[in-house]
Amino acid sequence: AVFVPIKLQLYIRFIFSAIFPIRPLIINNYLWLSAKGHELNERYVEQVVMSTKHCRPKMVSPDVFSDDELRQINTPTLLLIADQEVIYNPESAVYRAIRLMPNIDIKIISDAGHGMSMDQPEIVNKCILNFLNK
């Protein structure tokens, strides 16, 4: 599940890529998900190209957590949000998490897109380790 609805653009892009699995289109989607200015990770791109060309993906549309579901989460929770997120509205997700979850620890990852663990691996890893070591 997710905090806020996924943007329609994600589904359109990925359906189009599944119908026309050509490398330039797949790379364009990869760049759209990444923070601007980051270099392509060729190994990852090749994995995505191969899986798009040779696999039959099943599109799963995640449900949006209800307010009641989020209020019931009392466990300390880390929410990492990329400052250049494109598949949902990051400000809305942060606002909703703060409003409904008392034990939320939110970190905004600068210069990162949806693939934040690839855009900023050291920062993401540090945030996770710091949270787990509390």
Image (cartoon, rainbow, N blue to C red):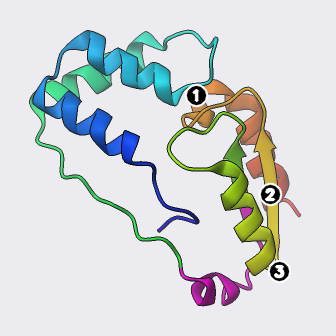
CA gap, disc 1 to disc 2?
A: 19 Å
User: How far across and down, in percent of the image, does residue 121 sit?
Assistant: 67, 30
As for residue 76 lying within the magenta part, the answer is yes
Whether residue 113 is situated above or below residue 23 in the rendered picture = below
Res 77 seen here: no
CA gap, disc 3 to disc 1?
A: 29 Å
Residue in the image at 47% along x and 68% along y: 1
Whether residue 6 is situated above or below residue 117 in the rendered picture = below
User: Toward which corner of the image does residue 114 lie, by quadrant?
Assistant: top right
Q: Type of residue at label 2?
A: Ile
Q: Magenta part of the protein: which range?
A: 66-78
Disc 3 residue crowd, few under 14, some 14–19, many 20+, Cα 10 Å: some
The reply to whether the C-beta atoms of the residues labelled 1 and 2 are less than 8 Å apart is no
Whether residue 21 is situated above or below residue 37 in the rendered picture = below
Res 58 seen here: yes
Instruction: Please state if 123 lies on the left or on the right of 82 as rendered.
Output: right
- Circle 1: element type: helix
The residue tagged 1 is 118
Residue in the image at 74% along x and 59% along y: 94
Q: Type of residue at label 1?
A: Met
Q: Type of residue at label 3?
A: Pro
CA gap, disc 2 to disc 3?
A: 11 Å
Q: Nearer the viewer, residue 12 or 129?
A: 12
The residue tagged 2 is 106
Single out the residue that lies furthest toward the front. 8
Residue in the image at 66% along x and 90% along y: 72
Q: Nearer the viewer, residue 54 or 98?
A: 98
The residue tagged 3 is 102
